[in-house]
Image: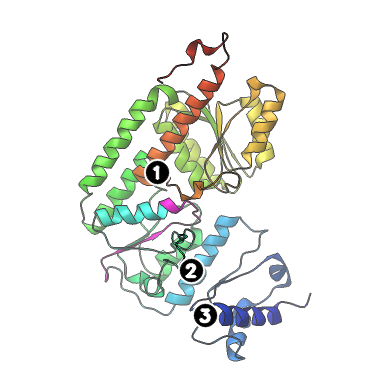
Amino acid sequence: MFGGNNNMNLGLQNASALYKPEIIAVSTTCMAEVIGDDLQAFIANAKKEGFVDDSIAIPYAHTPSFIGSHVTGWDNMFEGFAKTFTADYAGQPGKQQKLNLVTGFETYLGNFRVLKRMMAQMDVPCSLLSDPSEVLDTPADGHYRMYAGGTSQQEIKTAPDAIDTLLLQPWQLVKSKKVVQEMWNQPATEVAVPLGLAATDALLITVSQLTGKPIADALTLERGRLVDMMLDSHTWLHGKKFGLYGDPDFVMGLTRFLLELGCEPTVILSHNANKRWQKAMKKMLDASPYGQESEVFINCDLWHFRSLMFTRQPDFMIGNSYGKFIQRDTLAKGKAFEVPLIRLGFPLFDRHHLHRQTTWGYEGAMNIVTTLVNAVLEKLDHDTSQLGKTDYSFDLVR
């Protein structure tokens, strides 16, 4: 009721004593924002009054849940880290012959690893500015790790010295782009989320152009394997209709890849996208013969999407765990109305270990092709398994 200054002092003191951190990140909740708590003053006073040592960096961000979504909060916090560690640093772009990669809000741990692998294969030094792949996936080997992996303070402090910073989910990284261009004086060369064949091609070509390093032969071979998989599964995926929902960059990347596969994304919904994104989506869909019947929705929730599954009746829907309730509801109307859910995106609560998978790069595209085509074949087996009635197509080889 009277502000959170005292609670924050105690929180900083306790966190410092228990975890011995070098950094304590602070984000707000709705109540702190409604009250109007001054985070900058609170942090300064906490250090002045000895609740936390002055040597501990405390980046902060305003993250009320009534503004934007989780991707907005990530963007705000990146800005907070950048201001804390680089605001007083006069960087020299190109001083270090490396690239910065900023993923944005990303929960597939394999995507961080595949980025590092692809850069290593091209002999391109890079810094992932935020890398949770180890701290969120520590092994059960009897050794406790408080701070596994991650991005070092030195990497963020010298980020302005990189050749460039690539924002891999640009629709959600609005403030991050401003930081890169205005604080770090780097171009933030435009790239799209590297989901699918063409987007991965574009990322690797951009990296090669910026660094002068050729695309590795190993990546060319990997690309060829992906193309081979796409050809192998084309018969089963071509013409299949999908409804999909999720965050803007994920949905745009997945839609692009579905078009590459010859699928028809007939219903596309992103609740936290804007009109510019919607316009860009329609332009991409209009350019493909597989996007002619597509509808793009923004500022709509899953209740709206549920209605569309009944009226448009795609073959499958793609999205997070919440779609299971829509699948249940469509099935309740009758087996002919069921729209099966393929789980891709965030969050995935009801299946294990999917967060460890890869969806970016050629490796991630292979995983997605495998997931999609096997969902189609699983449904085909189910639909042809009734003895003496439908099992004339219950084939061993698909």
Amino acid found under the numbered disc labelled 3: Lys
Spot occupied by residue 329 in the image (x, y as percentages of width and height)? 70, 31
Q: Residue at x 63, y 45 (%)?
A: 299
Q: Would you say residue 257 is visible in this rendering?
A: no
The label nearer to you, 2 versus 3, is 2
Nearer to us in this view, 22 or 144:
144
The residue pinned by badge 3 equals: 20
Q: In which quarter of the image is residue 126?
A: bottom left
Q: Which residue is drawn at 55% across and 29% down?
A: 316
Q: Would you say residue 125 is visible in this rendering?
A: yes
Residue at the farthest top position: 388
Crowding near pointer 2: few (<14 within 10 Å), some, many (20+)?
few
Amino acid found under the numbered disc labelled 1: Gly
Compute the Cα span from label 3 to label 1. 37 Å
Q: Which quadrant holds the C terminus?
A: top left
Q: What stretch is highlighted in magenta?
A: 95-110
Spot occupied by residue 115 in the image (x, y as percentages of width and height)? 36, 54
Q: Is mark 3 on a helix, strand or loop?
A: loop
Amino acid found under the numbered disc labelled 2: Tyr
Position of 360 relative to 178 (above/below): above
**First in sequence: mark 1 vs mark 2:** 2
Which label was assigned to residue 364? Answer: 1
